[in-house]
Amino acid sequence: MTDGGSALPARGPVTRASVTTVGIATACTALCGYAVLYLAARSLEPAGFSLFGVFWGAFGLVSGAANGLLQEATREVRAGRVGTRPEQHRTRPMWLAVGVGIGAAALIGVTAPLWSARVFTEYQWLSVALLSIGLGGFCLHATLLGMLAGTDRWTQYGSLMVTDAVTRVAVAAAAFVFGWGLAGFLWATVAGCMAWLIVLVCSRPARAAAALTCAGSARTFLAGASHSVAAAGASAILVMGFPVLLQATSSELGAAGGVVILAVTLTRAPLLVPLTAMQGNLIAHFVDQRDRRLGALLTPALVVTAIGAIGVAAAAVAGPWLLHTAFGPEYQASGALLAWLTAAATAIALLTLTGAAAAGARRPRSPATTPGSSSPPGRPEPPRAWRSPTAMRPPSSTPRRRCS
């Protein structure tokens, strides 16, 4: 017995239309992100922007780690397209995400006295509260994105992305117009954490995706998710953790810190925002192309490298002028610095891309992943010529990892 499975079959390999849909949503998300940064930089002096940048980076770090739930949900749903046998144990990823979100929020709140004073020098407890609430909501946001990606519901996937981004920029615009200062932009950073609820209320396909169940126990799903979260967290430290690490290791960032944080953020956004937003699309693509993994990775890697090379040249030539013109005379950085930061962003983008490929290529964590396989997890299956006739027959009771 399954919930919602018949209504949402995965509909085959990732198509050009799906990439276009997510690409448009990604462009809107990137523009909204730039708008929030622009409004914050215009409203706050560089010293104040450095404080905002630290919180922006902190939320990006923890939400980036939570994207491991997106990866695991996408992979499990996508890998489970085949097979129709009933399973003994079933798990609801969205309900697991509720528990993970509550636990993550509680962990931040409990450990905050140990680190928050060092990281958040102003609005300390407001920052802790918003970070906890934002992460809790984002766990469900990321899991729903994964369920939608695994079932090819790219319109709803894009709608969820855009709802999150538009909510953020709306609150940031209000903070700019009404002069709410730093506190207003802290609220804007996490304003989209409940976008998943808006999409569930408004979209029947999204509700059907959220009702999906996966074969296997909660422990098995969470074990796989823990690997994805750890990998995504390591990537998030590289992508978004710089302002937090800078604040934690410096006595005071000041105006210079604000300029550096803005420069790093702007040079990383053109590549890393789209790649992060398209994680579900990429993982679905790599799952579909398991038989030609290197070829599936080569084309997007070449595209990222080419865009990065163009970005390095553009940052060296036009970067200082653009920074000064768009954000004000207080923000000054050399072309060489911006070029090196863009090159570093390209390297991180390639690392992010290969991480998605690895997540898509990873086999489901279960006792059997193909009919006739009885090897335990981590042990390679013997060649067919070595198996006994009994071992070559598909077992009737061995569970398969699939979602329906």
Image (tube, helix red, strand yellow):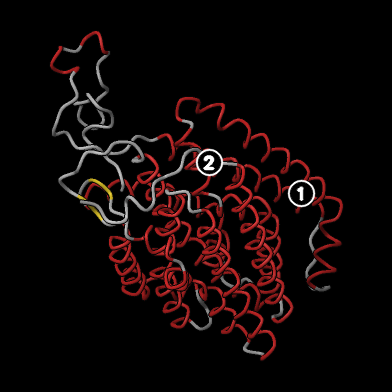
Q: Which residue is mark 2?
A: 14
Query: Counting residues from the N terminus, which is met first, the one under dot 2 or under dot 1?
Result: 2
110 on left or right of 127: left
Give the class, few, some or many, for how many residues have Cα within 10 Å of label 2's Cα (few <14, many ≥20): many
Q: Position of residue 7 (x, y in %)?
A: 36, 53
Question: What is the residue that sits farthest to the top in this orientation?
Answer: 385
Q: Closer to the camera, 102 or 322?
A: 102
Q: Position of residue 180 (x, y in %)?
A: 62, 89
Q: Closer to the camera, 347 or 91?
A: 91
151 on left or right of 176: left
Give the class, few, some or many, for how many residues have Cα within 10 Å of label 1's Cα (few <14, many ≥20): many
Mark pair 2, 1: CA separation: 34 Å
* Element type where label 1 sits in the image: helix
Q: Are marks 2 and 1 in contact (CB under 8 Å)?
A: no
Eyeballing the image, is 36 above or below 392? below
Residue at the spot 56% in from the left edge and 71% down from the top edge = 251
Q: Position of residue 202 (x, y in %)?
A: 47, 71
Eyeballing the image, is 197 above or below 355? below
Q: Position of residue 338 (x, y in %)?
A: 76, 53
* Element type where label 2 sits in the image: loop
Q: Amino acid at mark 2?
A: Val
Question: What is the residue that sits farthest to the bottom in this orientation?
Answer: 178
Mark number displayed over residue 339: 1
Q: Amino acid at mark 1?
A: Ala
Q: Closer to the camera, 150 or 343?
A: 150
